Amino acid sequence: QVQLVESGGGLVQTGDSLRLSCTASGRTSGITGMAWFRQAPGKEREFVAAISWIDGSQHYADAVQGRFTVSGDNSKNTMYLQMANLKPEETAAYYCAAPRSGVGVTRNSRLYIYWGQGTQVTVSS
């Protein structure tokens, strides 16, 4: 089993920046990468960004490309999401996710089996 814990959420104003963190523990060997998803009330969970530990590649949703940066330290099993120029419509619970051991990162939330409890990001207008 892998446990994921997010931190760093909070209340910010439009245009502000915020950094989220996610730390994995447990049986993390074999995890090839991690991802961020978000879910607003009444909406489906959506992909935000992912990072591969295999080749260091980063992947972003179109809506956050150029404003968000995903990074991490595989040796510390920690991933970050630096968010800039936040918008009110990005108010959501942000979740960290990891796929099954040996499976690569993807934009499809259904292929992730480990999830954190989520951290709330609220952007006021």
Image (cartoon, rainbow, N blue to C red):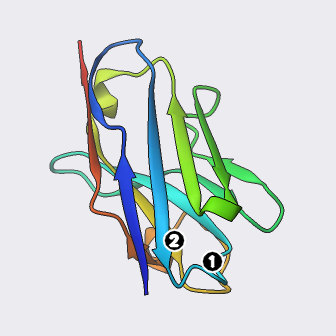
Whether residue 46 is visible: yes
**In percent of the image, x 34 and y 13: which residue is there?**
14
Q: Is residue 95 above or below residue 120?
A: below
Residue 27 screen position, x and y as percent: 53, 85
Q: Quadrant of residue 106?
A: bottom right
Q: CA distance from mark 2 to mark 1?
A: 7 Å
Image side of residue 61 versus residue 30, left or right: left
Numbered disc 1: secondary structure: loop
Residue 55 screen position, x and y as percent: 84, 62
Q: Is residue 125 above or below residue 93?
A: above
Residue highlighted by disc 1? 31
Numbered disc 2: secondary structure: strand
Image side of residue 82 versus residue 11, left or right: right
Residue highlighted by disc 2? 98
> Which of the pair 31/68 is nearer the observer?
31
Q: Is residue 48 above or below residue 32?
A: above
Residue extending furthest toward the left: 42
Residue 88 screen position, x and y as percent: 29, 23
